[in-house]
Image (cartoon, rainbow, N blue to C red):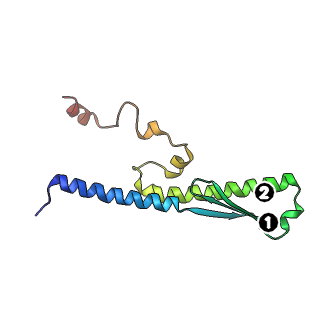
């Protein structure tokens, strides 16, 4: 026997909520470490790109002057942040509407108006006519 439609909706809602809670946990658990090409420095960031650790590996970093070392650290930070953003986007993608790019959403470059037009959803004229009768 089929459940009450409201109970089915509630059950579906609870399943979605559970999946979103799991997604949140997976995203907040992301930590990424990037290592410079010559292994002079490693940088670890969390899911939001906040630096949680910087390590100077061996003594290779000593051959750089302050400006070069700063550039090396900044480049490695950028790589770690990019990897963290990529992992977050991969986890988020299955939950997004069709056509929405998770990477663009995460980077803030998604065109919201293309996905959700300000004048309402796109629909065939026949559907629009039925709605406005």
Q: Who is closer to the viewer here, 97 or 7?
A: 7
Q: Position of residue 126 (x, y in %)?
A: 24, 35
Indicate the quadrant where residue 39 lies: bottom right
Residue shown at the point (84%, 54%) measured from the top left? 68
* Residue lying at the far top of the rendered structure: 133
Would you say 30 lies left or right of 63 here?
Answer: left
Residue shown at the point (65%, 64%) measured from the top left? 33
Q: Secondary structure at mark 2?
A: helix
Would you say 24 lies left or right of 126 here?
Answer: right
Q: Position of residue 41 (x, y in %)?
A: 76, 64
Q: Which residue is mark 1?
A: 40
Q: Is residue 61 above or below residue 113?
A: below
Indicate the quadrant where residue 118 lies: top left
Q: Position of residue 73 (x, y in %)?
A: 76, 56
Task: Tell which circle, 2 or 1, labels the residue nearer the N-terminal end.
Answer: 1
* Residue lying at the far left of the rendered structure: 1
| Crowd tier of the residue under label 2, counting other residues whose Cα lies within 10 Å: few below 14, some 14–19, many 20 or above | some
Q: Which residue is mark 2?
A: 72
Q: Who is closer to the viewer here, 66 or 72?
A: 66
All told, the count of numbered labels is: 2
Q: Are marks 2 and 1 in contact (CB under 8 Å)?
A: yes
| Crowd tier of the residue under label 1, counting other residues whose Cα lies within 10 Å: few below 14, some 14–19, many 20 or above | many
The quadrant of the picture occupied by the C terminus is top left
Residue shown at the point (31%, 37%) measured from the top left? 123
Residue shown at the point (53%, 62%) measured from the top left? 29
Q: Is residue 66 above or below residue 110?
A: below
Q: Position of residue 7 (x, y in %)?
A: 19, 55
Would you say 50 lies left or right of 3 here?
Answer: right
Q: Is residue 131 above or below residue 59?
A: above
Q: Secondary structure at mark 1?
A: loop
């Amino acid at each position: 026997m089929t459940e009450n439609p409201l109970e089915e909706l509630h059950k579906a809602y609870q399943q979605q909520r559970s999946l979103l809670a799991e997604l949140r946990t997976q995203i907040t658990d992301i930590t990424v470490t990037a290592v410079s090409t010559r292994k002079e420095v490693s940088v670890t960031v969390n899911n939001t790109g906040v630096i949680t650790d910087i390590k100077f590996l061996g003594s290779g970093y000593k051959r750089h002057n302050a400006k070069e070392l700063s550039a090396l650290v900044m480049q490695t930070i950028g790589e770690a942040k990019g990897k963290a953003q990529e992992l977050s986007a991969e986890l988020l993608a299955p939950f997004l509407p069709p056509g929405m790019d998770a990477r663009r959403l995460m980077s803030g470059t998604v065109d919201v108006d293309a996905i959700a037009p300000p004048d309402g959803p796109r629909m065939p004229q026949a559907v629009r006519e039925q709605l406005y009768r």
